[in-house]
Image: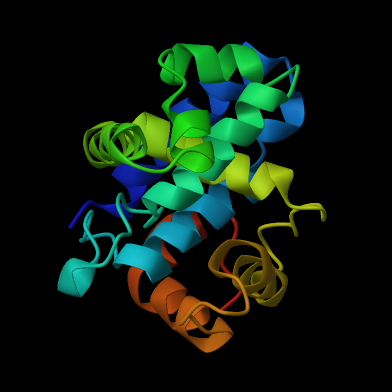
Amino acid sequence: MIEPSKLLNGIIRPACTSLSHFLGIPLINTPSAHALLLRIAAVESSLRFRRQHHDGPGTSWWQIEPLTAASLMARAWDDPVWSNWAEVFDPERTGPIAKRHNGEQSELARTRILVRLAFDPIFACQLARAKLWFAPEPLPPPEDVDGQARYWKRWYNTPLGKGTVEAFKQARAELLASVEKANGWWSG
């Protein structure tokens, strides 16, 4: 298990900071984003599993599925602001290939994304942040745990996902109390 403070300070904050600087978008790097990314990692992987249980497709602490990653990368390639980031992390355009094509080339593209998610936590965190950025609603503040739980369920886990708001809040309570108290996010 990764310590929550190490995930927050060693992966999440640097990933958001570098992404924000690279894109020139200060709102990428906020306490709301940091808190939500940490909480998502807690509920999605228990801060333990970088591969989904029972051979599921989710990878990284944020349990990003390869097809979701491919879709996000394709969207980034199509966005004038995000395309430079996509070029750095996906120079072979595996996202658009994986999303738009079938067959061997698509399978190779998905495999490349899966490997990147598994072994590059900064990329995985930035991809999770991209997923939250592209959602049509602003992030709730870190003190609004219920709001962040509902946001995660609607825009990250999706209404079809197996996760629940209750599981989100339980994972937070069990795994994140000390780091949230240290950051002023804890409300009990």
Instruction: Count the labels in the image.
Output: 0
Query: Where residue 109 sits in the image (x, y, percent)?
Result: 34, 33
At x 66%, y 67%, the residue is 148
Is residue 40 visible from the viewing direction of this image? yes
* Position of residue 53 in the picture relative to residue 35 (left or right): left
Q: Does 43 sit above or below residue 104? A: below
* Position of residue 106 in the picture relative to residue 53 (left or right): right
* Position of residue 162 in the picture relative to residue 121 (left or right): right
Q: Quadrant of residue 103?
A: top left
Q: Nearer the viewer, residue 19 or 187?
A: 19
Query: Where residue 113 sits in the image (x, y, percent)?
Result: 34, 36
Query: Where residue 43 sits in the image (x, y, percent)?
Result: 41, 70
Query: Where residue 180 sits in the image (x, y, percent)?
Result: 49, 59
Is residue 10 visible from the viewing direction of this image? no
Q: Nearer the viewer, residue 179 or 126?
A: 126
* Position of residue 24 in the picture relative to residue 121 (left or right): right
Q: Does 72 sit above or below residue 84? A: below
Q: Quadrant of the N terminus?
A: bottom left
What color scheme is it? rainbow
Q: Nearer the viewer, residue 5 or 128?
A: 128
At x 56%, y 67%, the residue is 186
At x 29%, y 67%, the residue is 46
Q: Does 129 sit above or below residue 35? A: above
Residue at far bottom of view:
166
Q: Quadrant of the C terminus?
A: bottom right
Residue at far front of view:
103
